[in-house]
Image (cartoon, rainbow, N blue to C red):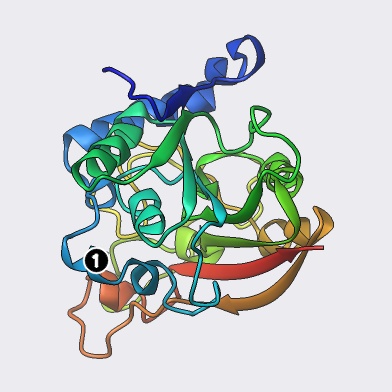
Amino acid sequence: MTENKNSRLYLGPDDSTSESAELQHNQVAWDRLVEKNNRFTRPASDEDFNNPLAVVDGCGWLGGDIRGKKVLCLAAGGGRQGPLYAAAGADVTVVDISNAMLAIDREVAAARNLQLQTVLASMDELTMFAVASFDIVIHPVSTCYIANIEPCYREVARVIREGGLYISQHKQPVSLQLNQVPVGEKYFLENRYYTDGKPLPAGVSGSLVREPGTQEYLHRWEQLLGWMCRAGFVIEDLTEPVHAKVDAAVGTFAYHSQFVAPYIRIKARRC
């Protein structure tokens, strides 16, 4: 796979990050998900580019104009986040551990004459970036793929400027505890809340909230929110994107979401 002029590769000092079994497992898993055209590996549509900022910032947290802003899209390959922010006028860098996911970003950028840079790296290893390199860090759902999110938060705090925005999404911990197939019309807590840093059980074929083949971790509320604050951020807002439908068929994602919101979205500011 060839790199274009806007791409960089980085795997950490002495490639130590790439040697992590956790990282390698999820690198391979996401490359395979790209091959299978998983729903999270599909690029933004033509319609999305009609008003790109509205698509990625439905809450209006970015103030309506990001032209000229330096934006880091963290663990965000796949042809959606980076290209849409670039189309909205931002100076975009996309970091991801999967070169297959980054390749989609490069293809979309080339097809739409957009400028963005791609970097192959783990979300908790950003030493290729200087202090205060970015005005905004966008972090879609992905913290579940690393065992310890504290180093990730510290790295984000280091590379974002004072007063900069960190907008992140995470899998709600209870949604990762629930069984995926209802018993009758109900769900129960299948996985422990206190996991001691161990990955969730494998074998999630057909899961409503987990990606097949990946290694995932449940992070407690203290870790998701408390550790973010301790890293140097002030949380300004939090939403739970609504995926529930009252008339949803039993066993569907919309039905499962009636019991617990699958995701949370956090607006935080570097203090």
Quarter placement of the N terminus? top left
Query: Which residue: 33% across, 66% down?
Result: 52
264 horizontally vs 255: left or right: right
Give the image location of residue 77, x and y in percent: 38, 42
Q: In this rendering, is residue 268 above or below 82?
A: below
Residues 263 and 193: in front is 263
197 horizontally vs 91: left or right: right
Query: Which residue: 23% across, 37% down?
Result: 107
What is the total number of numbered labels drawn onto the structure image? 1
For disc 1, the marked residue is 48
Give the image location of residue 163, x and y in percent: 75, 63
41 horizontally vs 12: left or right: left
Query: Which residue: 27% across, 90% down?
Result: 246
Residues 158 and 14: in front is 158
Give the image location of residue 253, x and y in percent: 27, 69
87 horizontally vs 249: left or right: right
Q: In this rendering, is residue 256 above or below 167?
A: below
Give the image location of residue 60, x and y in percent: 50, 79
Give the residue type at disc 1. Asp
Query: Which quadrant holds residue 254?
Result: bottom left
Query: Which quadrant holds residue 69?
Result: bottom right
Q: Residues within 10 Å of mark 1 (few under 14, many from 20)?
A: some
Query: Which residue: 33% across, 41% down?
Result: 203
